[in-house]
């Protein structure tokens, strides 16, 4: 687990993230176009059958914390 200062990471198994999807795009318009696609619309329509929560964040800048 990621040792974020001041954040507890000792959550019980049933409260841990079990997967993630990262989508990169050049603009918000590109993201909106992707979300309107037939394939994504189908997944969104059925997400209640497999998800208890979904979170979305806008990332302005990312910085690597581990480098090879």
Image (cartoon, grey):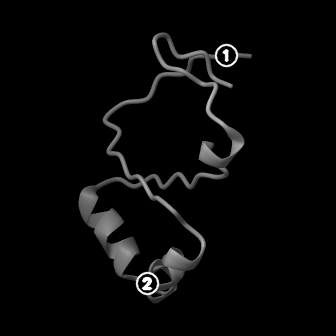
| Percent x, y of residue 53 | 47, 59
Task: Assess disc 1: are there few (<14), some (14-19) or many (≥20) residues with their C-alpha within 10 Å of its C-alpha.
Answer: few
Q: Residues within 10 Å of mark 2 (few under 14, many from 20)?
A: few
Q: Where is mark 1, residue-wise?
A: 67
**Relative to 48, does residue 3 appear above or below in the rendering?**
above
Q: Quadrant of the N terminus?
A: top right
Residue 6 drawn above or below residue 23 = above
* Residue at (45, 52) in percent of width and height: 24
Label 2 vs label 1, nearer the camera: 2
Residue appearing at x 32%, y 45% in the figure = 58
Q: Quadrant of residue 45?
A: bottom left
Residues at marks 2 and 1, CA–CA distance in whole angstroms: 36 Å
Residue assigned mark 2: 41
> What SS does tag 1 mark?
loop
Work out whether residue 61 or residue 1 is closer to the camera in this orientation and state it: 1
The residue at the point 41 percent across, 52 percent down is: 55
């Amino acid at each position: 687990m990621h040792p974020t200062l001041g954040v507890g990471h000792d959550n019980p198994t049933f409260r841990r993230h079990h997967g993630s999807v990262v989508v990169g795009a050049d603009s918000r318009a590109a993201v909106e176009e992707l979300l309107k696609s037939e394939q994504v619309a189908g997944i969104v329509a059925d997400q209640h059958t497999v998800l208890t929560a979904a979170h979305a964040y806008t990332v302005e800048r990312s910085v690597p914390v581990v480098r090879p």
